[in-house]
Each structure stands twice: as structure tokens, then as C-alpha cells.
Amino acid sequence: MSRTARPLVIATAFAASLVVGLLLMFWAMGGVSKVAQPAAIGGPFQLTDQNGKTVTDKDLKGKPTLIFFGYTHCPDVCPTSLFEISEVMRALGKDAGRVNAVFMSVDPERDTPAIMKDYLSSFDPHLEGLSGDPAEVEKVIKSYRVYAKKIPGKDGDYTMDHTALIYLMDREGRFVSPFNLKRTPEDAAADLKRYL
């Protein structure tokens, strides 16, 4: 074997063993279908909307759902995200009623139905605000894998650090992906229509 052929044979043998190793790993894990399972995000809940009505995860089924976790005392990220969601709902036009848009509070101590109703009056009327018992809110935060932490301020006041992405759930309530709002409302609405 020539000196120039030897590295080629070694590289080919390495690549072949790598492929065989990956195939064995996929086989041991139950195949590709197990590897590509959707993320376990979301789950059952029972919260209260801004009108005092009980809402469960079952009430959201049948429509794709955009969910944003935040709080009404948020200085910047929450109102900006809710404005962007409102713009997508506007761009959906007559299809806006075929999509759930949900603002879930990470601050149930302050976000009562009355506070949520007043706060959401500045945004698209399709937006539904959900809050409730702190233990139930904590359960939802965990099931959606949301980071939320109270940050003490002056005079007993506080802010909340929290995950700031928009969750896209399908018509069956399964997590699809984070929903990108950093594009035109028309492009985001066109993307969302694929899930109707």
C-alpha cells in the first residue's frame, strides 16, 4: 500500500465505524421515532381569565394557541410582546377568532382578574389573560418549563424575571415551537395560518 493511500484507507475505516456506531445507537434508543418526539411542554391546568371565568387546558383545544408568560407590572418586555401578538391577530383578520392568544401571569399575587382586564384593554380583544391560585400558577410554570423568579425592589415592591418567549401550541395542545415575532405581522400571521 502506498504512503498516499494509507491515510485515505484509515479515514474511510474511521468514517465507516462512525456510521455503524451511530446506527447502533439509534437502534438501541428505539429508532429515529423515539429521538424525534415532541418536547414535553404544557399540561393540564385550571386558571381564571380576566372576566372571572374558569379556563382549563381543554378549553384551548381545537385552535392553535400562542401563549406568553409575563405579568402586568412588567416595564418593557411584556407590553412589547403583547403589542406584537396584537399586531399578528390584527394581520390574521377574519381568522383571528380561530386562534387562541393567551397571556399567562407569573405574578398571581398582583394579577387579579380585574387587574388583568384593565391591563389587557390596551391590546387586541382576542387576548385572554389567565391567572389564579399561586400553587396552580406554579404548576403551569413548571409544566411549560418557564423560568420565573421574584426580584425584590425598594419599599417591598418587586419585579419578576421570566422567560420571554411565545409558545406555539397546536390544535391538540401539543407544543410545536417558540413562535417568532421578530418579523412582519403579516409574515407571522401567514406562518400561524398553517396550524389552523
Image: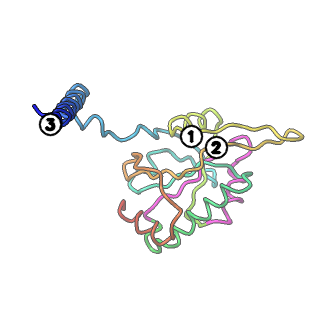
Q: Which mark is residue 146?
A: 1
Tell me which residue sits at (75%, 44%) in the image.
Answer: 159
Q: Which mark is residue 5?
A: 3
Q: Marks 1 and 3, Cα distance to the nearest angstrom? A: 55 Å
What residue is disc 2 on?
A: 162
Q: Is residue 84 left or right of residue 31?
A: right
- Which residues lie in the magenta part? 98-123
- The image position of residue 38, as x and y in percent, is 36, 41
Counting residues from the start of the chain, the first of labels 2 and 1 encountered is 1
Q: Is residue 163 magenta?
A: no
Instruction: Say what secondary structure mark 1 lies in.
Output: loop
Residue type, mark 3 in image? Ala
Q: Are marks 3 and 2 in contact (CB under 8 Å)?
A: no
Residue type, mark 1 in image? Val
Q: Marks 2 and 1, Cα distance to the nearest angstrom? A: 7 Å
| Along the line of sight, the residue nearer the viewer: 25 or 9 | 9
- The image position of residue 106, as x and y in percent, is 64, 43
Q: Is residue 116 magenta?
A: yes
Instruction: Say what secondary structure mark 3 lies in.
Output: helix
Q: Are marks 2 and 1 in contact (CB under 8 Å)?
A: yes
Give residue 117's quadrant in the image: bottom right
| Along the line of sight, the residue nearer the viewer: 61 or 77 | 77
- The image position of residue 190, as x and y in percent, is 41, 69
